[in-house]
Image (cartoon, helix red, strand yellow):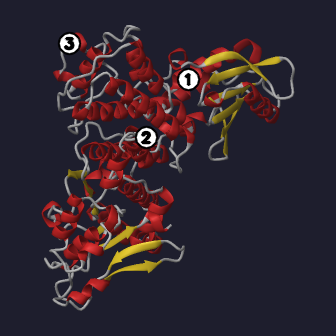
Amino acid sequence: MPAIAWSEIRSRAATFARDWAGETSERAEAQSFWNEFFAVFGVDRRRTGVRFEKAAQRFGKRAKGRIDVFWPGLLLAEHKSAGQSLDAAHTQATDYFEGLNDDELPRYIVVSDFQNFRIFDLEDGTEAELTLAELPKKTHLFGFIAGFQKVRIREEPEANIKAVQKLGELHDALKTDGYKGHALEVFLVRILFCLFADDTGLFSPKDSFLELLETTDEDGSDTGRLLAGLFQCLNQRRDARQKSLAETFAPFPYVNGKLFEERPDIPAFDSNMRALLLECCRLNWSSISPAIFGAMFQKIIELDAKDRRRQLGAHYTSEANILKVIRPLFLDELRAEFERIKHNKNALFEFHKKLPTLNFLDPACGCGNFLVITYRELRRLEADVLRAAEAFGAHIVGAFKQAVMVNVDQFHGIEIEEFPAQVAQVAMWLTDHQMNVEVGLAFGEPFDRLPLEKSANIRQGNALRLDWEAFVPPTKLNYILGNPPFVGKQLQSEDQKKDLAIATNNLKGIGVLDFVCGWYFKAAQYLSGSKEGFASGDKKQFADVRFGKQPRGIEDIFVSLDQQDSTAREHIRCAFVSTNSI
């Protein structure tokens, strides 16, 4: 079933506002009011776990009170009769936090007296107010009810940690039972996609994946079979699906993007594995950051392979440090250009056309955190461009697929391991959907890109032995960025020493260099157009690969070329960062 359109929500909201225009009595009509209010957004409150009159301890009170409307983890609402204080209703709502578990605490508080609403976003610290009559024009303020909410990506919030631990437990249980290798990795990446899709509006209604799994037997005997059928349907257009499956899998769209194309063996489940999967489903995946989840999850599943992680250089770069690289590399300059031209119609439209032509390469991408953050920031810049374009009469609402031009296929990555490469691919799709939700909220219209027609170009392979120019032609690329692995000479494996020698064309003295220098040399080679990796025949130009101090004390590594050399590709910039030096 497709997500309910905002045009339909606004139509329902107009009917709702008209029907309830004269109501004043909380005691008589509050529950009917909220049942119909949720229906405006296509939400059946019984299916989502919303409860009326939940008993809960109040701060400073001996006796328990009752929460008028409670949606665990998302919403707490207090309802008053007309004329009563909404300030007092807000105080009463926050008093109930005393009697809630941490995982039940809501992000939003809503107070109402039938004719007025106040919405408090506890994560952002923001507040909005509207009247019942204004509801049809301001339905976007309640987008979180329909599953459309703006996600804030932060440094390893508790939600990420819980999600990693729980999915890690499922991984361990399956692996211990003998389900492992490529099949396990593909299966976990698909589950990861489904968990996000279930909480962010791609599967509609919300919690469709959870409810599907809840229909399976408690012993888990039919769970694997049901998942196999689901994965098959996600790879089929609706009109191509077997009719007998239509009702069971009706909420699930055609995804494509090759994510569900392969047919590896599906695991058999027992009661414990099924319970672990259901626990994963009950977490709020809309608050998980694709930028850091993949790297954290990789650490969890490799805890018994610490030496292998060091050999492969697996590591995690925080969002703050990624931003310190991409801002001076390109983002600050693009932002400054936007500010200069945003009031000039022709210049603004030309600037917008430039954004989807920019291409990025991370030649040590891991689970994709550099690519994810870069894509997110480019999409947010484009959203600002679209807002500015509205001032010149550009019609955005209803035309998103034409207006939003930045896409995941502008991003390229090389990763030596299969599982992180797969996670990077999915993380880009998930981030794309998060950005689609953001722009949909900004312009009051749901927006998704299903079926997935484009994907990030993630190549599994050894970056020091691959031909970067064959992977991404220099005429297409604009920026090289990332955090290649640092491994000292004494800690390098024999294969790594061979990789370094191959990458540097057996440069004399290479044996004393850190493993990361292979990436610097390959970048210099790419930027200069010289197989020697230098901007000229003089090998002293190797000094042009240098460490440079940045204003915030971070040691970034920039590849610099002799600008006088006619072969230098001056349109390409490169910046690497060392987390070891922050």
x then y, percent, for residue 467: 14, 64
Dot 1: within a 10 Å radius of its alpha carbon, few (fewer than 14), some, or many (20 or more) residues? some
User: 11 or 535, which is in the foreground?
Assistant: 535
Against 251, is 444 above or below? below
Against 487, is 8 above or below? above
x then y, percent, for residue 293: 43, 43
Amino acid at pointer 2: Glu
Residue marked by disc 2 = 445
CA distance for labels 1 and 3: 31 Å
Amino acid at pointer 1: Phe
- Residue 136 is left or right of residue 197, and the answer is right
User: Are the residues tagged 3 and 2 within 8 Å (C-beta)?
Assistant: no
Q: Quadrant of the N terminus?
A: top left
Compare marks 2 and 1 and give the one earlier in the sequence. Answer: 1
CA distance for labels 3 and 2: 31 Å
User: Are the residues tagged 1 and 3 within 8 Å (C-beta)?
Assistant: no
Residue marked by disc 3 = 243
- Residue 281 is left or right of residue 476, and the answer is right
Against 322, is 399 above or below? above
Dot 3: within a 10 Å radius of its alpha carbon, few (fewer than 14), some, or many (20 or more) residues? few
CA distance for labels 2 and 1: 18 Å
- Helix, strand or loop status at disc 1: helix
Compare marks 3 and 2 and give the one earlier in the sequence. Answer: 3
Q: Residue at x 44, y 22 (%)?
A: 276
Residue marked by disc 1 = 38
- Helix, strand or loop status at disc 2: loop
Q: Residue at x 58, y 23 (%)?
A: 37
x then y, percent, for residue 501: 18, 70
Residue 326, quarter of picture? bottom left
Q: Residue at x 26, y 63 (%)?
A: 357
Q: Is residue 114 visible?
A: no
x then y, percent, for residue 94: 75, 33
